[in-house]
Image (cartoon, rainbow, N blue to C red):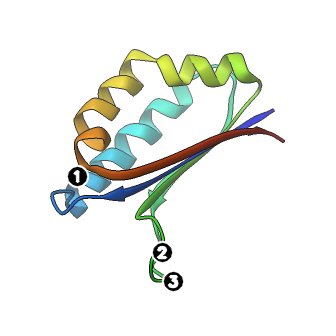
Amino acid sequence: MIRHVVLFTWDDEMTDELERQFTDELTALAPQLAGLRSYHAGPDAGIIEGNFDYAVVADFDDAKAYLAYRDNAVHQDIISRLSRPHARNRASVQYEI
């Protein structure tokens, strides 16, 4: 199984409304993806200062299922409209679990 983790720090233009839209669109896409076992996305809880602003954690059956998600046209559209324009910093990792 492959776990995908991506973290974002937003620019000042990312509003709470845009962040909710980002979460809503990502979580609406998740049930449509073959090979996806678990999907969580949302803003930092604000417990520790200096954290990233937002995280996505997804578990896939295998690398092929992860790559299908990564390249999915709807996913790419969501990224191009909502995260890429507002991501000051982004970090990601995929690892076997």
Q: Amino acid at mark 1?
A: Leu
Task: State the residue at coordinates (23%, 58%).
Answer: 11
Decide: is 34 above or below 83: above
Of pointers 1 and 3, the one earlier in the residue sequence:
1
Q: Amino acid at mark 3?
A: Ile
The crowd level at tag 2 (other Cα within 10 Å; few <14, some 14-19, many 20+) is few
SS label for mark 3 = loop
Q: CA distance from mark 2 to mark 3?
A: 6 Å
Q: Mark 2 = which residue?
A: 45
Q: CA distance from mark 1 to mark 2?
A: 17 Å
Give the image location of residue 3, x and y in percent.
71, 40
Q: Mark 3 = which residue?
A: 47
Q: Amino acid at mark 2?
A: Ala
Give the image location of residue 92, x and y in percent.
56, 44
SS label for mark 1 = helix
Task: State the residue at coordinates (22%, 52%).
Answer: 18
The answer to which quarter of the image holds residue 78 is top left
Q: CA distance from mark 1 to mark 3?
A: 22 Å
Q: Where's the N terminus, which quadrant?
A: top right
Q: Do the numbered discs 2 and 3 sit on residues whose CB atoms are within 8 Å?
A: yes
Q: Residue 53 shows which numbered tag?
A: none
Q: Where's the C terminus, which quadrant?
A: top right
The crowd level at tag 1 (other Cα within 10 Å; few <14, some 14-19, many 20+) is some
Foreground label between 1 and 3 = 3
